[in-house]
Amino acid sequence: MRRDQSPGAVGARIAELRKARGLTLTDLAQTCGVSESTISRIEHGLTAISAHHLFSLARFLGIDIADFFADNSAPLSRGMRSVSRRGEGVREHFARYDVEVLSADLSRKDMHPAINTISARTLEEVGGLARHAGEEFLYVLEGAIVLHSELYAPLELNQGDSLYFDGGVAHAYLAATAAPARILVVVSVDGRPLELVPASPEEG
């Protein structure tokens, strides 16, 4: 059965992890480059968090991003494997897109796979470009997207196209047509500090 997160589930998990570590709203706000009120709205399920802020919080809290979706994720170890049946990933609404997190039952992974549904058509809708540590691979499953980047002209990718690139280059995905697009995304993890290109002080 498909596992949809209840409204505010990720926000509640962020609040739980923050309080367990004795951290304040200010600590998380400074990490993400947003206001305390934005973090508070995220924790109460009133504002959707962006994926790059979630990666930033994962690094700051010293956890795997999968730990935001389940509190019983098992550390990756020799011989372990994770099977994600079609449609059974953990689904969550982010500020930039809807995501189906794959292999959420494994933590401390070197790669984070997900299926993203892209419907935004303008950079204003997604809050501008964002960068993250690590490398990224994407494959267009359905529809078409336009990848905007700080170093390259907008690139249109259609069903069956793929791209491997440095996630440290600020970027954003947009739907190329009125129909939403679905992409498989795999993001690697490394030790570099995460940097953001915020669109505004209140971007969630």
Image (tube, grey):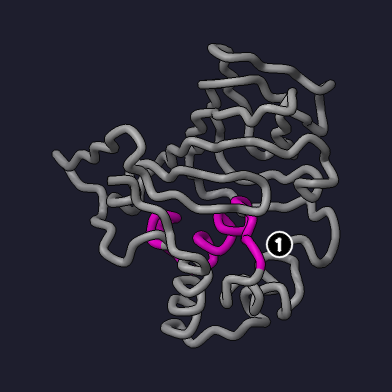
Left or right side of 9 for 25: right
Give whichever of 121, 32 is nearer the camera.
Answer: 121
Residue 63 is situated, as x and y percent measured from the top left of the image, at 42, 62
Residue range corresponding to the magenta coloring? 47-67
Quadrant for the C terminus, please: bottom right
Residue furthest out toward the left: 79
Q: Which image quadrant for residue 65?
A: bottom left
Residue 116 is situated, as x and y percent measured from the top left of the image, at 54, 37
Q: Is residue 186 above or below residue 10?
A: above
Residue 204 part of the magenta-drawn span: no
Q: Amino acid at mark 1?
A: Gly
Residue at the location (68% across, 65% down)? 32
Give whichever of 85, 136 is nearer the camera.
Answer: 85
Left or right side of 27 for 99: left
Give whichever of 139, 26 is nearer the camera.
Answer: 139
Tag count:
1
Residue at the location (43% across, 59% down)? 5
Residue at the location (25% across, 48% down)? 76
Q: Which image quadrant for residue 111?
A: top left
Left or right side of 101 for 127: right
Q: Label 1, on which residue?
A: 204
Residue at the location (60% across, 53% down)? 94
Residue 189 is situated, as x and y percent measured from the top left of the image, at 48, 44
Residue 16 is situated, as x and y percent measured from the top left of the image, at 44, 79
Q: Is residue 143 above or below residue 194?
A: above
Give whichever of 97, 164 is nearer the camera.
Answer: 97
User: In terms of secondary structure, where does tag 1 sit?
Assistant: loop
Prevailing SS of the magenta stretch: helix
Q: Is residue 121 above or below residue 153?
A: below
Q: Residues within 10 Å of mark 1 (few under 14, many from 20)?
A: many
Q: Is residue 46 above or below residue 112?
A: below
Residue 52 part of the magenta-drawn span: yes
